[in-house]
Amino acid sequence: MGIASSQSGDLSLIQLDGEIDIAIAAELRASLLEALKSGREISVSLDAVTALDLTAFQLLWSAQREATQNGLKFTLTRELSEPIQSSLKSIGLDGLLVG
Amino acid sequence: MFQEVSNNAEQFKQSFREEAREILADLESALLELNENREDMELVGRIFRGLHTIKGSGAMFGFERLAAFAHDLETTFDLVRNGRLEPSSDLIDLTLAALDQIKAMLEEGANGAPLADSTVFEAILDNVRKLAGIAEIAAPLKQDEPAIESPAVLPVEIETWQIHFAPGPELMRCGANPALLLRELGQLGCLSVKSDTDAIPALCELDAERCYIAWDLELKTGASLDAIRDVFIFVEDCCALKIERAAIPALLAAPALPASIDAEAAAKVLAEPRAPKGGRREYDAPDVASSIRVAAAKLDCFVNLVGELVTVQARLSELAATRDDAEVSAVAEDVERLASALRDNSMDMRMMPIRGTFEKFRRLVHDLARSLGKNVELSLVGADTELDKSVIDELNDPLMHLVRNSMDHGIDGPEERAARGKPAVASIRLTARHAGASVLISVTDDGRGIDAEAVRAKAIERGLIGPDALLSETEIYALLFQPGFSTAKQVSDISGRGVGLDVVRRNIDKLRGSIDVSSKPGEGTTVTLRLPLTLAIIDGLLVTVGKGYFVLPLANTLECIEISHQQIVAADGNHLINVRGDVVPYIRLRDQFEAIAAAPLFEQVMLVDTEEGRYGLVVDSVLGNCQTMIKSLGRVYRHVQTISGATILGNGMVALILDLERLVADSISTGRPQVRGHPRALEKSGAATVRA
């Protein structure tokens, strides 16, 4: 459970695992900032994510916006799982994070 | 790590329990008040909010069964609040019973308490549902299906509400989760959600633990504005909230929601540049709590340590006095001043209003009145009077016995009252007030009063007194508190086993208190408990007798006069002294404690105020004031009644603290000095005369 960051070639990879919520939001923010600073393409893996809360959403959304503004490619490795999509939908945040 | 998490969870549960107990106590008083004043919608609102809080926090801390149970009650009171259900006495009784169940559920699992019996609360819920006239408020409770949330299924008008909700910076730090709030809102009806993410700042400026998203919501529901507001009840201080009916654009939410601002203003606030880290927004809730919860054991430990400090300080002062060193003396004086302030402060921390104990009796009186078929009103006077927590803890039982006794023996049934021309509603009054270093707590009823003759006859029958014993009224009333005494013709559930008042006396004795009874036949009875303000530290007067040190509680001492050895001898065993024309009996502690050291030429008579009147205690010398931490003498000396404890002096010696009331009472019962007969006779008998 948690966050693993790695860099290979032109790619910064952030792998998220388990519940991504306020408890590790600060850590996620640091990882995303580092990835943005590196100027590489950013890829966030959500394969093993079981839950994603508001704070995690805000961070990913902000990072995505910033990367796009800086001309960096920002991808999520796959679509969010159905339960996560549905929980984001219930608070009106579905469809904002794009893969 | 896991251990830590589970410890934390247990800690949260514990604080929820503490909070819930307070809320339950408040709910109980509110319900009983509602019973007397059925029209009071403010009370209904208070009950609803209490149940809502218990439900909400209960679910948050893992008390799902409790939350589900409270939910159904809450729904019922929502009906009452909306005027769709009458707050009948049946409903109030059922809700009181339900609160007992919630109490049981609250304690489930704590300290190995068993699970509450689910059949009992199923039965209560069934009755509540029947009473509310609704088929099912919620599906029947099952243990594995907790927290069923479904809106009341009554035919109601569906309305559309526009809600703007913008969390403030502190909202998530308070433990609230906007997603859960929206989910709860969704359960009220059909909710459509539109989020506004514009305020999410750049990553480097983003506070990871704050919610920047705002929502515009549309809710179609039959629920009232109050029900919608209640979803936000815990967060209304730390969010911007606007609720308005879609059809009527006027603002409805304004008055009760201080944080309410309009959507534009909210958007502006959220869109403006982020404050520097640590900065504060206008609508930040203050993060300094006005009070904190401290475990009683920690407080006890603290007071104990302060007591030890006072002892050590006394020793320091004594050492400083023996050395002629100005610097050391100055430090010792500073320490003395600080220790004294610390002592007062720590004592003050333990002081609590007696209201909590008093309020509990509303329920007792209500239930007893029901079961005895009597109409009784309880009034509380001086409930904000403060006294030491340990005294309050010990007061519950004695007061309960006294109130039960008044309800059962004191107050007549409605017919007898009518026959005596008394008002139909009987009254019991609990009063608390300060009197010097004591607190007086009285239980007063307007019942039939105590029949002194019946008490006397019973005491003779029981062999407590001889048939020809001459007893004053006070002495007769005191018999009521003797073990095994009961004048009730029949043993009832309420009292009458003859153990109650005995327990009262034992408990009050333990607190170094006393009991006074006054009664007028046909008019009523007042039982007054006189209790010390605190049990831990007292101001005392240090005296010596022979080679021993003794402490007299300063609160009881009046003045000090001298008596010569000659006068004592001249009195010829009549322990009486003439103080400015008044004859005062005295007890010579030398004789009492059989001191063998030679007596000084002049001894000191400390005049003390006791229940038996003014008494003198003759001691060898008076050393001065002292702050005294009372230590128990332990089990070995528990039969020594005239000593209430011991303390350690600055020089390391042990001083015994005298229980003046007991000392005097003991002297009287053993035939030592007391004023009997005409005072003039005493003068003739050679009472020593003192000119002060």
Image: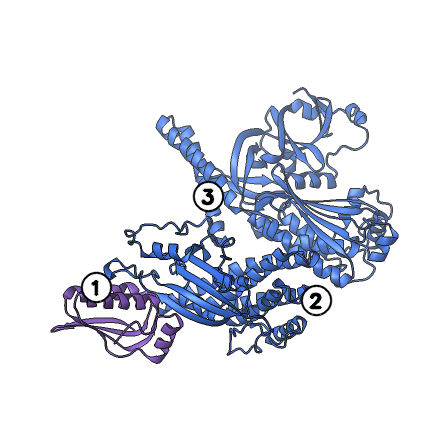
Chain colours: A purple, B blue
Q: Amino acid at mark 3?
A: Val
Which quadrant of the structure image shows residue B172? bottom left
**Considering only vertical position in the picture, is B559 above or below B37?**
above
Left or right, B337 with reference to B448: left
The residue beneath circle 1 is A33
Which quadrant of the structure image shows residue B531? top right
Q: Nearer the viewer, residue B551 or B14?
A: B14
Give the residue at x 39% y 29%: B329
Label 1 marks a residue whose chain is A
Left or right, B143 with reference to A50: right
**C-alpha span from label 1 to label 2:** 63 Å
Give the residue at x 23% y 63%: A30
Q: Is residue B605 visible?
A: no
The residue tagged with tag 3: helix, strand or loop?
Answer: helix
The residue tagged with tag 1: helix, strand or loop?
Answer: helix
Residue reaching furthest right? Answer: B419
What is the crowding at mark 2: few (fewer than 14 residues within 10 Å), some, or many (at least 20)?
few
**Considering only vertical position in the picture, is B80 above or below B541?**
below
The residue beneath circle 2 is B90
Front label number (3 vs 2): 2
**C-alpha span from label 1 to label 3:** 52 Å
Have a look at marks 1 and 2 and say if they share a chain. no
Q: Amino acid at mark 1?
A: Leu
Left or right, B540 with reference to A65: right
Left or right, B40 with reference to B187: right
Query: Which mark is first along the chain, 2 or 3?
Result: 2
Q: Nearer the viewer, residue B64 or B347?
A: B64
